Structures are given as structure tokens and as C-alpha cells.
Image (spheres, rainbow, N blue to C red):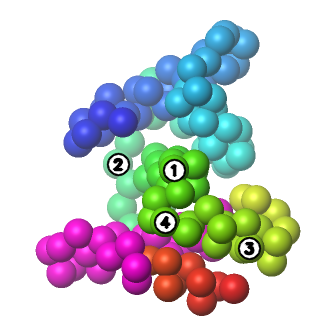
Amino acid sequence: MFGQNRQQLRQMYYDVWQKKQADEDLSSLENMIAQVISEHPEYHAIFANETSLQQEYFVEDGQSNPFLHMGLHISLHEQISTDRPAGIRKVYQQLQAKFGEVHDTEHQMIECLTESLWLAQRHNQAPSESNYLIALQKLL
């Protein structure tokens, strides 16, 4: 959404949530962000004030980054809506039938997505769409 500018991205989440709480009109992208935030009540406190947007999150300290987590949900929504990689929409529908709950299905898929991204970074190459789809199909 904003390239590599972490602060702009976090500010966008914050602004969208404020608009949602004020019942203002949202663009389709803002609706998607608001939906993801709504599905994560455990993160709502970080939107109570803008100073929370500066917080650092360290895996070494057992913390997970809520902005990264929500961004992965949004990435998954985009993949499904565009069916890229080709076939992901069908796999998503099959996984949703298996797991039942949309949010649980997305979390299962996000595990595969994060592994795909981690492997790409580790090997300094683009993520493999085919390996990603294979990993998703293994969940079936």
C-alpha cells in the first residue's frame, strides 16, 4: 500500500479505524483494512492513541507484530480476490469448507504465506508461487 514506509502504513491503519469508529464512509481498501482490524479485537488497544503506532515488536521477546499480522490477512484477501497465484481462490474455498470458520482458514493459509516469504528472503529470491500453492494444498 505504501511501499516500505512503516509509519505511513501504520498511520493508515489508525486513520481507517478512527473513520470506522466514527461511522464515516470508507473506500473499498479502507473497508478491507477495517474488516481485518475488526476481526482482531486483541489489537484494538493499539488504536486508542497514535503513540502506540511507534511501538517496536521483537520476536526474540515473544512479541508478534500486529501490523504484520493484519497485513498478511490483507495480502491474502488480495490474493484471493485476484486469484493470484492462479488457483488460490479455489484452494481457499476448499480450505474454508474444511476448516469452517473464515478467520481460522486465513490463519492456516497465513502460515504457508509466511513460510513462503521467509524462504524467499532466506534464499534472496522471489517467492515461489507454485511452492506456496503446494503448501496450501497440503492443508487439504
Look at the magenta stretch and give its main secondary structure: helix
Residue 124 image offset from top left, x and y in percent? 15, 74
> Of the residues shown, which amino acid type is indicated by label 1?
Thr
Residue 138 image offset from top left, x and y in percent: 60, 89
- The mark lying in front, picked from 2 and 3, is 3
Q: Which residue is mark 4?
A: 86
Magenta segment includes 17: no
Judged left or right of residue 31, residue 7 is left
Quarter of the picture holding the N terminus: top left
Disc 1 vs disc 4: Cβ atoms closer than 8 Å?
no
Q: Place residue 102 in its image quadrant.
A: bottom right
The kind of residue on which mark 2 rests is: Glu
First in sequence, mark 4 or 3: give its number: 4
Q: CA distance from mark 1 to mark 2?
A: 32 Å
Residue at point 60%, 36% (across, down): 32
Q: Which residue is mark 1?
A: 82
Q: Judging from the image, what secondary structure is the residue with disc 4 in?
A: loop
Nearer to us of marks 1 and 2 is: 1
Task: Give the residue pinned by disc 2.
Answer: 56
Q: Find numbered disc 2 in the image and state the secondary structure of the residue it sits on.
A: loop
Q: Is residue 76 visible?
A: no
Q: Is residue 64 left or right of residue 129?
A: right
Instruction: Give the magenta part as a residue range.
Output: 105-131
Whether residue 100 sits left or right of residue 124 in the image: it is right
Q: Which residue is under mark 3?
A: 94
Q: CA–CA distance between discs 2 and 3?
A: 37 Å
